[in-house]
Amino acid sequence: MVLSTIIKNEWRNLLRSRIASWLLGILFILSVFTIWQATGKVKESRHHRQESAAYMREKFTGQGEVNPHSAAHYGHYVFKPVSTLSVLDNGVNDFTGVSLYLEGHRQNEAAFAPAQSSSSLVRFGQLTLSLVLQVLLPLFIIFICHSAITRERETRTLAVHLAQGTPLRTLVWSKTIAYTVLWIAFLALNLAILWLMTRSAAAPVSTARLGGLWLLYAGYYFIITALSVLVSAGSKSSGNALLTLLFAWLLCTVLLPKVTANLGDNLSPLLTRTELEERISTDKKNGIDGHNPSNERTQQFKDSLIKAYQVSSPDSLPVNLDGLLMQEDEEYNNIVYDKHFGTVQRLIKKQNAATAVSSWINPFAFVRNISMALAGTDVYHHFDFAGQAEAYRRVIIKTMNEAQAYGGSKTGDWEWTVSADFWKKIDDFSYQAPSVGQALQNNKTEIASLLLWVLLAVLLIHFGSNRLSVNL
């Protein structure tokens, strides 16, 4: 009974506060504006990429009667689908490419990221829903909750509550629940608007991912609210509580993320583009080269085929040696690129591990990383797209090389062509996004830290509230 009475009283006081109402209203307007703006960008990006993908597919299937290896050098483009939940959290999308060029003998990286053509101002961030939910709303929570208990002390009502037998723990729980419910309602309203707007933009949202985001941010706001009320309970004045909480907010959202990012970069520095290209080039020179007949490994491969088919020369082979050499070249290059690109990805994962570990002391770290994972905009989703695109490249290049090798052409006959229908038999690229469980596989540390922070907040309120030194 006492709990519900205090909760209702807190809601009533908050509604009476013009400053709080105005600030919450401004935050709501900002969040709706960012959803509307981002939804338009997502719809436009999806339209452009679908249009570009359809054009490239038409070009690919309409090549006509050409030599398959020539077509492999001509190449083909695939495009990364736009995640609908990038409306909420755009993650690393501004810094990773949106298209991938698939060609023979070479594995490329995604290109044409929006930030590549932006000014340096992009480094300062953009107004997004994730900024509102992760940074601005917690700041608002601090401004509201810093005086949750100190206000009672300053108005002499805290002594009355305690004299009536209401434990300080009950008071802290009541205020924490009262405020957390409001923030969760605000969050639910924003997610409902996001869901409605993205439906109108013909971009349905995964309900599992949306539900995961709701749970994530609900836990985040409970932690911030609980800690803010606890600091208020342990402070002598509202001013002291506010300064303490503002310092913690600045530390968690600005200083620690920068420090951990620099630490990760120093512990696991990436190779420069030049160094990476040099290492790839060196390893490729040590392998088979389908375009260089004097290459030692190329000659060894020719000799092995002649021996296997028991003929006297490459011209007597019942298959086209050129097609087999091209595919052998591809197989070796695949090993080289897997080695070096795999190293780059492992280094990036090690860098991200520094941020993941920091979530044990910084709630902002886990909410940012898990949010990107659920929105499908973290670096691991980009790696997944690149991996599926590379697997598709290998399939189409192998199909072309095998057509050259076993399609009836002779060795050295580079004028031989496939039929015009050959290209239509190759399936189009279709990216399959990972499930929610798969998406969160790389965020086990952050999930564990989220649960620990929630548990810590509960334990501090339940066992620590009554022990706080309060100067009445």
Image (tube, grey):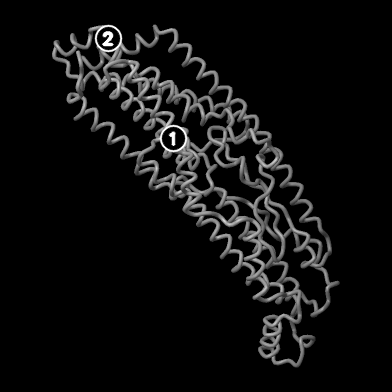
Residue type, numbered disc 1? Gly
Question: Which one is in front, 126 or 3?
Answer: 126
Q: Which mark is residue 211?
A: 1
Q: Residue at x 17, y 19 (%)?
A: 167
**Mark identifier at residue 250:** none
Give the side of residue 47 with respect to residue 128, left or right.
right
Relative to 362, residue 197 above or below: above
Nearer to us in this view, 147 or 199: 147
Horizontal side of residue 127 vs 293, given as left or right: left
Q: Is residue 410 visible?
A: yes
Residue 177: percent from left, percent from top: 31, 22
**Disc with the residue nearer the chain's start (2 vs 1):** 2
Mark 2 residue element = helix
Q: Amino acid at mark 2?
A: Glu
Quadrant of the frame with the N terminus = top left
What residue is disc 2 on?
Answer: 154
Residue 201: image quadrant is: top right
Q: From where the camera sits, is residue 212 visible?
A: no
Q: Residue at x 20, y 18 (%)?
A: 470
Q: Position of residue 171 (x, y in %)?
A: 23, 18
Horizontal side, residue 468 vs residue 278: left or right = left
Graded by Cα atoms within 10 Å as few (under 14), some (14 to 19) or many (20 or more), the crowding at tag 2 reads some
Q: Position of residue 356 (x, y in %)?
A: 42, 45
Q: Residue at x 61, y 28 (%)?
A: 200
Which circle, 2 or 1, is nearer the viewer? 2
Tally of numbered tags: 2
Q: Looking at the image, which is closer to me, 378 or 273?
A: 273
Residue at 55 percent across and 55 percent down: it is 270
Q: Residues within 10 Å of mark 1 (few under 14, many from 20)?
A: few
